[in-house]
Image (cartoon, rainbow, N blue to C red):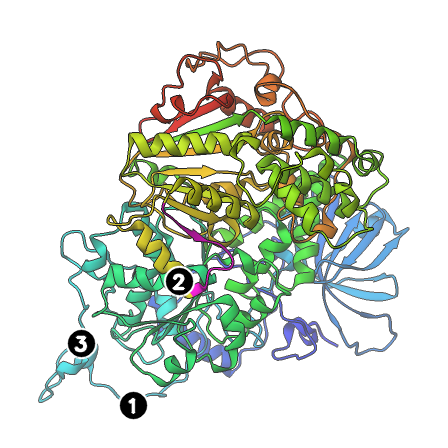
C-alpha cells in the first residue's frame, strides 16, 4: 500500500481519532530538505490554482525558503536522540499493507520507542545497530515490537519538546467547528451574477445602486473616545461571512463607553476577539480571570449588549439571546447590574427565582438575557433554548468535568462561552484542562493525550529527583501549554484598580484567650484522641474533628458546650472528644445565654463595635464567619447590645439576598451590622455600604479570606476601609495564619473542612505543630525573629536572623516562603502594651489585644 493510503492521508477515515489544531503554531514537522509528495495534477489542484489567482488577497502567504540537503544527522538533538513522524501497522508479509495509524518514533542509541498521537508508548525495541537507526530517512521501514513502521518525515527536537508533533497538521472533517487557516476550494459560478456597482466597482449603465445594501455602524466610530471593535481578518471573512455581506465597524454604545476604565476597555476588546473567533481559528471561548473588584461584570454586560445589537457582517446582531449562569446568591445582583449600566428601557433581563419560572422566559419574546443559578439550570435543562453566548460567573466551579453542572453546560449547543473567575485556574493541571475544555473544546486534544503530552512531563519536571532532560522537557511543554491557552485567558491583578480606590488599612489582631478558653484548650490537647493523632494511629476524619473542636473553642466556649449537649453519636471516636468537658464549665453555665467575657475575640469585637459606633455613627460594619453557629452567637450579641443588623447565610432564600444587600447599601439604611456567612456570600457580593469588615475566624484557604475582604473594598467605595482579622493568640488560629503567610499550600489539601475530608491528610509534624498552645502575645512575631521596637515604627531593614515561620512541616519552596515572610516583616508591629495603635477605633478596644500587625494599601503605597 502506498504512503498516500495511510490514515493520515485519507480524508474522512472514521477509524482515525481526530486530533487538534494548535492555533497560531506552525505544526509542520517537515525535515529540512525532504521532498513533499507531489501527486499528479488533477481537477482539485487546478481549482486550487484558480482560487489562488482569483482570490490572492485572502490567501495566507506561505513562502518556501530553500533548505540545505538533509544529512543523516538531520533532526538530531545534542544527546543523539532523533524523532520521526511515522505510520504503523501490524507486522505482515503482505505486499499491500493496511496502515493503522500515525505515530512518533523516538530513537536513542540502540533503542527505539513508538508513541501514538496521544503520547502513549505502543511499542519498544532495543538491540538495533547504531548505524541502522542513525541512517533512518524518509521512506525507510523498521520493525518495533511486532509492529512495522515507515518513516514519513523527521521531526525537529524543538517540535517534539513543545509537543507540536502530537498536534494535527490538517483539520479533520470530524471537527465541524474547526476551520483550516487555508482557504477551501470555492465552487465557481455558485452564486448568481451581481452587478459590479454593488461590489464597489464601476457603475453599470442604467443601474441604480440600492440603498438597502448600504450598511452603516450603529454608532459613530470617529466620535471622540469611541471604542471600535477590531475588524475581522480576510481569513475570518472567508470562513464566517458566507453570505458576502459588507463589513461594518462594531462600535460600543457610547452610553457604556463613558463608564469603562482603561483596563476594562482592554478587557472588552479581548472578550470580543475571543467570542468572535478572531484570536484562534474556530475557537469562540474566553476566560476572564481578573481579580475581584476589577469590573468583570461590567465588561460582560458590555460584550453582551454589543453582540445583541451589532455584528461585523452587514451589522446583523451576532446573538439573539444570552445566558448568564451564576451562583444562586448573585442571580438578582446580575439583573441589577444590567439595569444599572443599561437601564430597564434598553434591555429586558429575566432572572429565574421562586417567583419567576423559566417557562415564562420561553414563552416571552421580550427578554434577550436569561440569568439563572447553576442549581436551577440542572432542573430546567430540557427547557433551555438556544443561546448565542453563555457567560458562567464564578466559573471555577466547573473545574471538575465529571459533575452534573459541567456536563449540563457542555451539552448546550452554544459555541461562544465565557468563564468569569477571580480565582487562578492554573494551579491544578487537571482542573485547568476541564475549564479549557469547556470554553474551547478539543483545543488541548483528548484527556488522555493532554495527560501524556503535557501534564505528566510538567509534573515530572517539578519533582526534586527529576533529571535535567525531564526538567527541560517539562519547561518546554509548560511553555507550549501557556502559548496555546494564553491567547484566550486574561488575568489582571488588584494593582490596576487600587489607584481608583480609597486607602485600605489591614489589621491582624491577636486576642488574649479567656481563662475558661485556656483551661478547655489544655484539657483537649491532653485528651487521648489528640494523643492518638500525634502517634499516627488515627484516621484523617479524626484529625479534622480535633481541628474543628479547637477552632470552635477559639471562637467561643459556648459553641463547644452546645455541641456537648446536642451530640447524639455516643460511642464514636469523635464524640469521645467531648467526654468530661461539661465538668470544666461553671455549674450555672448556659450556652444559650451570651457571655462575652468567656471569649477573647468576642471581647475585642464588642469593644471595637462600641468604638466605631461612638466615633463614626454613620459607618457600617460587615462581620464574616465560616460557621452558622458563630453567626448565631454574634446575632445574640447584637440583640443584647441593641445593634440593628441584617444577616445572610445559607438559609437565606435566594430571592431575598439581593434585597438584603440593596437595603444595607442604601444611604438611608438603619442597619449598623451585616452578619455574613463566608460560604453563602463570600463571593461576588457588593457591600460598599460598609467601610469596616471583621473576619471573626480564619479560613484554611487564604483565597476565601481575600474574597471576603473584597466585599467592601471594591469599585464604588468612597470611604477609607478598615479590615480587622481576629486571631486567638498562641492557638491553632495562629498556626493557620502562619501557613497562609508562608504559603505552604495547606489550602490545597484542606480547601473545605466540610467537603472532601477523605482526601485530607496531615503529617505527624504538622499535627504536632497544630495541636499546641503557646503562652505568648504573638507566636507569629516570635517566629519572625524580628528586632523591632513593637511600637508601630516603620521597619528600615529586614532582620538578618533566620525566620522560623513555617519551619515545621514545611512543604513550600524557600524562595516563595521568604517573599511572604519579608512582606510581613515590612508591616507595622504593635505590642499590646504600646501607648497607641495610631488608630482611633483600636485605641478604645485595646484592653484584650496582645499584639497587632498593620499595613496600608493605597495608590500612594506601592
Taking the image as drawn, is residue 745 in sight? no
Find out whether residue 117 is within the magenta segment: no
User: Relative to residue 618, is residue 350 depicted above or below?
Assistant: below
Q: In this rendering, which labeled residue sits more in front, label 1 or label 2?
A: 2
User: Looking at the picture, does residue 700 appear above or below residue 61?
Assistant: above
The residue singled out by tag 1 in the image is 192
| Viewer-nearest residue: 338 or 135 | 338
Rate crowding at label 1 as few (under 14), some (14 to 19) or many (20 or more) other CA atoms within 10 Å.
few
Q: Are marks 2 and 3 in contact (CB under 8 Å)?
A: no
Q: Nearer the viewer, residue 425 or 674?
A: 674
Which contiguous range is marked in magenta?
644-654
Decide which of tag 1 and tag 2 comes sooner along the chain. 1
Q: Nearer the viewer, residue 531 or 195?
A: 531
Q: Residue pushed farthest front?
A: 588
Give the quadrant of the C terminus: top left
Q: CA distance from mark 1 to mark 2?
A: 59 Å
| Circle 3: element type | loop
To which quarter of the image does residue 820 belong? top right
Could you tell me residue 425's position as x and y percent?
A: 54, 50
Mark 2 crowdedness (10 Å alpha carbons): few <14, some 14-19, many ≥20: few
N-term mark: 1 or 3? 1
The quadrant in which residue 747 appears is top right
Disc 3 marks which residue?
201
Find out whether the residues at labels 1 and 3 contact each other: C-beta distance under 8 Å: no
User: Picture coordinates of residue 780 (x, y %)?
Assistant: 59, 23
Residue pointed to by mark 2: 656
Disc 2 or 3, which lies upstream in sequence? 3
Amino acid at each position: 500500500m502506498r504512503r498516500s493510503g495511510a490514515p493520515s492521508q485519507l480524508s474522512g477515515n472514521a477509524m482515525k481519532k481526530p486530533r487538534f489544531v494548535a492555533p497560531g503554531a506552525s505544526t509542520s514537522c517537515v525535515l529540512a530538505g525532504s521532498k513533499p509528495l507531489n501527486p499528479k495534477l488533477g481537477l482539485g489542484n487546478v481549482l486550487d490554482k484558480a482560487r489562488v489567482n482569483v482570490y490572492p488577497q485572502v490567501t495566507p502567504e506561505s513562502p518556501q525558503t530553500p533548505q540545505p540537503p538533509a544529512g543523516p544527522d538531520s533532526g538530531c538533538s545534542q544527546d543523539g536522540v532523533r524523532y520521526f513522524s511515522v505510520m504503523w501497522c501490524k507486522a505482515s508479509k503482505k505486499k499491500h499493507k493496511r496502515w493503522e495509524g500515525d505515530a512518533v518514533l523516538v530513537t536513542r542509541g540502540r533503542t527505539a520507542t513508538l508513541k501514538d498521537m496521544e503520547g502513549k508508548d505502543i511499542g519498544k525495541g532495543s538491540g538495533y545497530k547504531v548505524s541502522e537507526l542513525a541512517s533512518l530517512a524518509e521512506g525507510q521501514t523498521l520493525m518495533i515490537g511486532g509492529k512495522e513502521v515507515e518513516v514519513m518525515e523527521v521531526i525537529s527536537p524543538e517540535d517534539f519538546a513543545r509537543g507540536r508533533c502530537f498536534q494535527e497538521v490538517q483539520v479533520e472533517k470530524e471537527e465541524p467547528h474547526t476551520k483550516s487557516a487555508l482557504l477551501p476550494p470555492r465552487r465557481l459560478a455558485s452564486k448568481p451574477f451581481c452587478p459590479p456597482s454593488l461590489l464597489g466597482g464601476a457603475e453599470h449603465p442604467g443601474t441604480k445602486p440600492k440603498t438597502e445594501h448600504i450598511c452603516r455602524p450603529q454608532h459613530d466610530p470617529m466620535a471622540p473616545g469611541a471604542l471600535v471593535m477590531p475588524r475581522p481578518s480576510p481569513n475570518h471573512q472567508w470562513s464566517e461571512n458566507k453570505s458576502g455581506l459588507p463589513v461594518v465597524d462594531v462600535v460600543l454604545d457610547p452610553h457604556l463607553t463613558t463608564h469603562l476604565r482603561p483596563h476594562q476597555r482592554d478587557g472588552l476588546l479581548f472578550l470580543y476577539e475571543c467570542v468572535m473567533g478572531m484570536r484562534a481559528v474556530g475557537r469562540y471561548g474566553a476566560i476572564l480571570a481578573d481579580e475581584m473588584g476589577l469590573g468583570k461584570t461590567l465588561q460582560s454586560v458590555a460584550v453582551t449588549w454589543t453582540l445583541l445589537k451589532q455584528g461585523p457582517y452587514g451589522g446583523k446582531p451576532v446573538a439573539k439571546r444570552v445566558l448568564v449562569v451564576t451562583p444562586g446568591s448573585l442571580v438578582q445582583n446580575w439583573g441589577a447590574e444590567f439595569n444599572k449600566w443599561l437601564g430597564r428601557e434598553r434591555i429586558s433581563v429575566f432572572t429565574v427565582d421562586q417567583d419567576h419560572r423559566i417557562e415564562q422566559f420561553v414563552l416571552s419574546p421580550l427578554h434577550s438575557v436569561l440569568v439563572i443559578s447553576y442549581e436551577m439550570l440542572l432542573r430546567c435543562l430540557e427547557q433551555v433554548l438556544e443561546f448565542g453566548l453563555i457567560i458562567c460567573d464564578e466559573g471555577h466551579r466547573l473545574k471538575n468535568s465529571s459533575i452534573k453542572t459541567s456536563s449540563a453546560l457542555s451539552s448546550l449547543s452554544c459555541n461562544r462561552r465565557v468563564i468569569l473567575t477571580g480565582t487562578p485556574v492554573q494551579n491544578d493541571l487537571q482542573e485547568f484542562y476541564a475549564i479549557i475544555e469547556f470554553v474551547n473544546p478539543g483545543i488541548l486534544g483528548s484527556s488522555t493525550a493532554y495527560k501524556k503530552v503535557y501534564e505528566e512531563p510538567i509534573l515530572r519536571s517539578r519533582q526534586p529527583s527529576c533529571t535535567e532532560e525531564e526538567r527541560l522537557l517539562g519547561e518546554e511543554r509548560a511553555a507550549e501549554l501557556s502559548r496555546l491557552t494564553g491567547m484566550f485567558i486574561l488575568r489582571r491583578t488588584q494593582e490596576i484598580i487600587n489607584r481608583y480606590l480609597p486607602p485600605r488599612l489591614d489589621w491582624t489582631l491577636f486576642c488574649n484567650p479567656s481563662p475558661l478558653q485556656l483551661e478547655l484548650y489544655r484539657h483537649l490537647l491532653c485528651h487521648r484522641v489528640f494523643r492518638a493523632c500525634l502517634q499516627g494511629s488515627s484516621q484523617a476524619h479524626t484529625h479534622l474533628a480535633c481541628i474543628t473542636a479547637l477552632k470552635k473553642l477559639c471562637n467561643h466556649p459556648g459553641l463547644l458546650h452546645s455541641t456537648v449537649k446536642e451530640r447524639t453519636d455516643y460511642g464514636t471516636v469523635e464524640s469521645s472528644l467531648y467526654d468530661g468537658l461539661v465538668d470544666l464549665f461553671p455549674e450555672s453555665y448556659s450556652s444559650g445565654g451570651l457571655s462575652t467575657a468567656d471569649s477573647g475575640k468576642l471581647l475585642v469585637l464588642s469593644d471595637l463595635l462600641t468604638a466605631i459606633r461612638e466615633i463614626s455613627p454613620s459607618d457600617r460594619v460587615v462581620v464574616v464567619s465560616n460557621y452558622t453557629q458563630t453567626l448565631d452567637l454574634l446575632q445574640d450579641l447584637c440583640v443584647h447590645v441593641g445593634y440593628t443588623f441584617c444577616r445572610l447565610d445559607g438559609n437565606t432564600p435566594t430571592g431575598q439576598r439581593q434585597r438584603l444587600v440593596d437595603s444595607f447599601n442604601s444611604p438611608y439604611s438603619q442597619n449598623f451590622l451585616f452578619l455574613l456567612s463566608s460560604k453563602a456570600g463570600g463571593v461576588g457580593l457588593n457591600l460598599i455600604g460598609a467601610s469596616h469588615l471583621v473576619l471573626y475566624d480564619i479560613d484554611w484557604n487564604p483565597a476565601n479570606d481575600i474574597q471576603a475582604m473584597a466585599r467592601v473594598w471594591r469599585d464604588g467605595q468612597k470611604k477609607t476601609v478598615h479590615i480587622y482579622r481576629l486571631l486567638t493568640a498562641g492557638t491553632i488560629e495562629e498556626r493557620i495564619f502562619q501557613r497562609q503567610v508562608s504559603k505552604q499550600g495547606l489550602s490545597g489539601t484542606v480547601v473545605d473542612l466540610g467537603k472532601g475530608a477523605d482526601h485530607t491528610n496531615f503529617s505527624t509534624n504538622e499535627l504536632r505543630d497544630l495541636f499546641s498552645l503557646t503562652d505568648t502575645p504573638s507566636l507569629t512575631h516570635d517566629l519572625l525573629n524580628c528586632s523591632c521596637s513593637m511600637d508601630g515604627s516603620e521597619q528600615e531593614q529586614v532582620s538578618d536572623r533566620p525566620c522560623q515561620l513555617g519551619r515545621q512541616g514545611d512543604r513550600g519552596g524557600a524562595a516563595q516562603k521568604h517573599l511572604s515572610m519579608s512582606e510581613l516583616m515590612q508591616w507595622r508591629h504593635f505590642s499590646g502594651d504600646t501607648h497607641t495603635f495610631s488608630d482611633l477605633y483600636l485605641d478604645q478596644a485595646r484592653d484584650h489585644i496582645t499584639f497587632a500587625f498593620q499595613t496600608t494599601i493605597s495608590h500612594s503605597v506601592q
